[in-house]
Amino acid sequence: MPQGDMKQPLLRSSRRPQGPLSDVGTDAPLVGILGTGDFSRSLAQRLVASGYRVVVGSRTPKRSSGLFPEEADVTTQQEAASQADLVFVGLFVEHYSTLSELKESLAGKTLVDVSNGMRINHDGPSNAEQLATLFPDSVVVKGFNVISAWTLQTGPRDGSRQVLLCGDNVAAKTSVAQLCRDMGFIPVDLGRLSSARDIENAPLRLFPTWTTPVVCALSLFFFFYFFNFLHDVLHPYVVNGKNVFYKLPIDTVNVTLPAVAMVMLALVYLPGLLAAFLQLRLGTKYRRFPDWLDRWLQARKQMGLLAFLCAALHAIYSLCLPMRRSARYKMLNTAYKQVKDGPAEVWDDEQVWRMELYISVGILALGLLSLLAVASLPSVGNSLNWREFTFIQSRLGYAALVMATLHTLLFGWDRAFTASQYHFYLPPTFVLALALPCAGAAGPPGAVRALRGAPPGPHPPRLGAGTLHPLPAARGGGEWSRAHQ
Amino acid sequence: MPQGDMKQPLLRSSRRPQGPLSDVGTDAPLVGILGTGDFSRSLAQRLVASGYRVVVGSRTPKRSSGLFPEEADVTTQQEAASQADLVFVGLFVEHYSTLSELKESLAGKTLVDVSNGMRINHDGPSNAEQLATLFPDSVVVKGFNVISAWTLQTGPRDGSRQVLLCGDNVAAKTSVAQLCRDMGFIPVDLGRLSSARDIENAPLRLFPTWTTPVVCALSLFFFFYFFNFLHDVLHPYVVNGKNVFYKLPIDTVNVTLPAVAMVMLALVYLPGLLAAFLQLRLGTKYRRFPDWLDRWLQARKQMGLLAFLCAALHAIYSLCLPMRRSARYKMLNTAYKQVKDGPAEVWDDEQVWRMELYISVGILALGLLSLLAVASLPSVGNSLNWREFTFIQSRLGYAALVMATLHTLLFGWDRAFTASQYHFYLPPTFVLALALPCAGAAGPPGAVRALRGAPPGPHPPRLGAGTLHPLPAARGGGEWSRAHQ
Amino acid sequence: MPQGDMKQPLLRSSRRPQGPLSDVGTDAPLVGILGTGDFSRSLAQRLVASGYRVVVGSRTPKRSSGLFPEEADVTTQQEAASQADLVFVGLFVEHYSTLSELKESLAGKTLVDVSNGMRINHDGPSNAEQLATLFPDSVVVKGFNVISAWTLQTGPRDGSRQVLLCGDNVAAKTSVAQLCRDMGFIPVDLGRLSSARDIENAPLRLFPTWTTPVVCALSLFFFFYFFNFLHDVLHPYVVNGKNVFYKLPIDTVNVTLPAVAMVMLALVYLPGLLAAFLQLRLGTKYRRFPDWLDRWLQARKQMGLLAFLCAALHAIYSLCLPMRRSARYKMLNTAYKQVKDGPAEVWDDEQVWRMELYISVGILALGLLSLLAVASLPSVGNSLNWREFTFIQSRLGYAALVMATLHTLLFGWDRAFTASQYHFYLPPTFVLALALPCAGAAGPPGAVRALRGAPPGPHPPRLGAGTLHPLPAARGGGEWSRAHQ
């Protein structure tokens, strides 16, 4: 590979240092890097740009030196290890053993393990812990693996600047944390080296908190879609030989979506009620909840957002109805019939009122849900304090649930009780959709309040991947002193 | 309460340290905690996880020790007070007096007051200041009350990581700030201990900046709704005995919302003009504005967002119109009349043009407003520099106002001048709604520019709860040097 | 200017210190400020509030002292320069020369250059570098120019708290960085003083990354609008003398928008394919891409968001169609014709299916696009790790493109092949709009994967203004070790 390539900065607006290095070399601290991979190269660039002196340990110094900024001193691994007190280990975990001959020169020094796991929660110890076992006399700090070579090169101005750290030695951790800050990152200390596993898993996650809610929403969708197919499409075909298969792309979907949204929304509030109930019965707030309830409570935010998504799609689908060719044709034919065999005056006041009411209530429900969705954006949610958060979650969230239920009830009107609606003895969808919410609504709001602020709302406080146990939330900063004694 | 409960981590993915504590106890700094409440417990967990040694002072060491991580040393208050140099006071403010016998052992040490107020701006000194009076020989730092026990336990990865601090002693504050960082929080120094009141109020706020704008929007809504009820519903009933009460849920709301949005939007731009006017008249940029104007200027962002909310709802309501049963019936009846008594060809070119125009202009106005709304999201707004921010606020914002006004004018067309529109001698709503905006539009954009970049736009720079005085904004980083001399 | 004005805090809830300053003056570090402009004043306030001692150097100490907090000691420039070791230079760059007589007293001290450029990339050295040349014996650190006087006064709780720093002396930079933190800001080190230019440009930027994409979108819009005018409005007028000019505000726009959206979306994915292709051909991942491709790759996020904006507007416009007077009239007339000359039964099954299908597919495409848009919000995007980001960008993004193309194909149906659609020998718009996407779709997804995670999606990772070179992204933290050698 031609040397020139790395010499010439990867970025047009390079952050790499130019000009004399007079001061560096005298007062600048020295950092060592073992390994010459992409990450090592970018790390070297960034360190130099942050004014550190860098010594790189390579098995082939000559060949590698071209890959690094000229300010970095590329030498043998032995050299680098003996010179620097803080050493980044930029190697494959498989190659850690190759460093064994550096044991003495690395003794008492701080090793930073920047490696990533190959897959989540692989058996055996974390990479960092393996490194620690190989170098019992050195201090191992885990970190920087969540940062990409790319972020290192461009500098941390854009995007996440958090660097997760952990390690058993406080002093070492503090110095690495300071290094982070000098490079423009925000160190986040996750405690002892035993947390290395979590840190190594971090970059491997693929929406772990979303899988269950999404699966749940999808299965609900398919169930209701099939149900509506039987109820609205197949039944008229079988019974009256009426071909309405054209309903499949829009009408059927548009009856399915609100049902899914309704149930998902109910599933957001149910666990809060269950938790409150358990808590009231068990009487103590220190008893743990059963795992399934724990996981459920943790998935409320995602479920709430999926409910919102379905509701929003439902709104768009509904708005599209009058625009369709089919609607147009129907209208024309009705008009034609009107004229041919009258009656002239068409106006069913009940139907008019029913529709005006459920539409306006539905719009309000959607409005409330979108407020909740906005409040669940990290940057917005973080600007709320506990009281505000709880207000939005439990008050607004509950109002949204009630509105949505009312919307469905008004839509249903009296049709739940007219036999004609029961095709194949199947009730109309809205009846099914209402089952859970009504159960939820039946749940005493007192129970909710009993949670003492624990949001039964769709978006548990400040949690992305974080687990949520409602009680500590309830005993949060805003109230701790009241809980004191 | 069974000991096991706290031993077993509250979180599945616990951050609590495992493994040998070899190094801690030797080099780790020692932190004291007085009190055994939930917050104290979580604090202890977090400190241990961050590699600190913790000594807890309890009135009942034996009973309490079970509540704390085993790494923490639970002893008498006297013991804890004498051992640690940095002591968290995890007590109810009412119980501060019970610590009086610790005066000597706490002398010269740093006390961290983590308590919250019971209600906003209660009389008398802040909790922290009370503590300072009780311990004149100790240094009091206020902080951590905005953090919940829950955030302490899960670690600060999710949600707001800012810890507001204040205190009169720089050294003490610096060490507490460092402690913050080691725990993964971001300390924000609010200056002297006299700011403790603000910090204690922080977790008690309930959308203080929103109350006035929301009240204002609601009262506007009710006024216009009642007005439209008289104008569009009651009048036809009284005069022609025509029953159109079905209009209440949607039509009337849909005439009310745009009026509210229009007025709110005008209210966003008016104070900027007033400020510019005052400034031009008073001639100096150092004279303060009257309080009411100050508060008004500070509420612009919220007013702008509420205006956007109303506009968005107005859009959805309008889109629902053709979908309604009532619309369908009307159409059918008209079709019937058409056929019965002709004329065959129905086409009023003026009406067509009017509607095509005001719809498309309305959509553009909504588009601009949503850009403003997005730019007011913290994470987006913060990525803008002053020039960009001012551009969005004063240029786009002004364009949105103009578009909205145009939308209303086109909607009104010539109907402001047809007597038939004046039911009960009341003008049509859009006439009222236009009054303010036109006043605003009349205001010289020169005046706006006179604010030298002070956004007359709905979303004052970077402000959540922050007050906004337009002039300093105008002298912001982007321009200070020009303002220099 | 009356003294009283600055004495009295600009803010109602002032952060300025009250109470005894006992400790300050003893242990508090001393900071110097040269110049008495607005920025200097606000800086002094903030420093005092953060517990620093401040000495201000003014050419007219008596006159100026009124402008500063009484805790600040206002004296001559000579005095200030000799007392403090860290000195802020709050002067116009033109006035730097006036400080020449301070050369000796500033020797060996740290000067902080807080000035802004007058215009982007002016010729000659950056202000900071000019200062450095004037004071060869002092150490110059660039910074704080991105912070406004206003933010300094209100404190950094609201809005961007990043302070960009650069300088050649590590020690000096570290102390300034610490000062930042004490004031509640987050220092971001951009390396050597040679980066001062970038930092001085920062507050002058006006959406540099948006200009090209916006221009591109606008020109596409005008091209397609004119095209549609010829095709749908002028042609019928010229040929059949049919006046449909009323279509200009809505119908024509609504045919134009989706075309623009389609092309923009294709332009988002094309460069990724080109890059993959180049990469496969050149065989090495270290060879640079040509500049134009680089810039194109960097503009993908903006292009994607503009595509989403057009798509969203297209949706709203479409939903408005049935609401319009023109639609109503058309319907009535058709109904009339129906009745007069039949046929009674109106139902074209093909047309019905076509519309039902392309509407529902279109809604799904819009849904996917909005997910991408939400994921491009800084606060959301930053919470994703590389795998999640890549999944959203390449999987969801690609799915959105496919859906949108399908939507257009279904809309087009067989009309691309009916001569009647070729007015003035011009093909219908959707044919043009499809050209690029189909090219893109033709591109092997394998090629995309060849980028090894480099998002071909609309929103390159974590980048606001940042440039994106797909390959380092591909070699990002999540994968570095695999790329290791």
Image: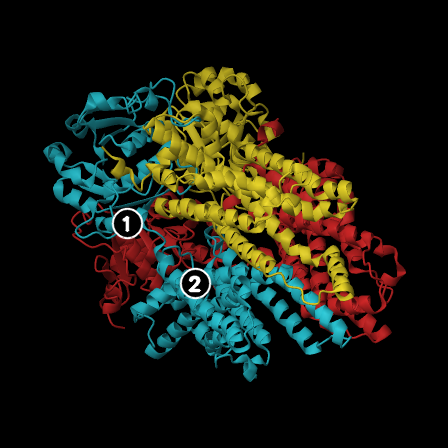
Chain colours: A yellow, B cyan, C red
What is the crowding at mark 1: few (fewer than 14 residues within 10 Å), some, or many (at least 20)? some
The chain carrying label 1 is B
Q: CA distance from mark 1 to mark 2?
A: 24 Å
Q: Say which quadrant the C terminus of chain A sits in.
A: top left
Task: Depth check: give the residue in front, B97 or B213.
Answer: B213
Q: For residue B201, which numbered disc appears in the image? A: 1
Seen in the picture, residue B171 relative to C73 is either above or below; the reply is above
Residue at the image position 38 percent from the left and 72 percent from the top = B275
The chain carrying label 2 is B
Residue A392 visible here: yes
* x and y, in percent, of residue C179 in the image: 33, 47
Task: Give the residue pinned by disc 2.
Answer: B303
* x and y, in percent, of residue A140 in the image: 43, 23
**The disc labelled 1 sits on which kind of residue?**
Asn
Secondary element under disc 2, as helix, strand or loop, is helix
Contact, CB < 8 Å: mark 1 with mark 2? no
* x and y, in percent, of residue A246 in the image: 76, 48
Precedes in sequence: disc 1 or disc 2: 1
Q: For residue C338, which numbered disc appears in the image? A: none
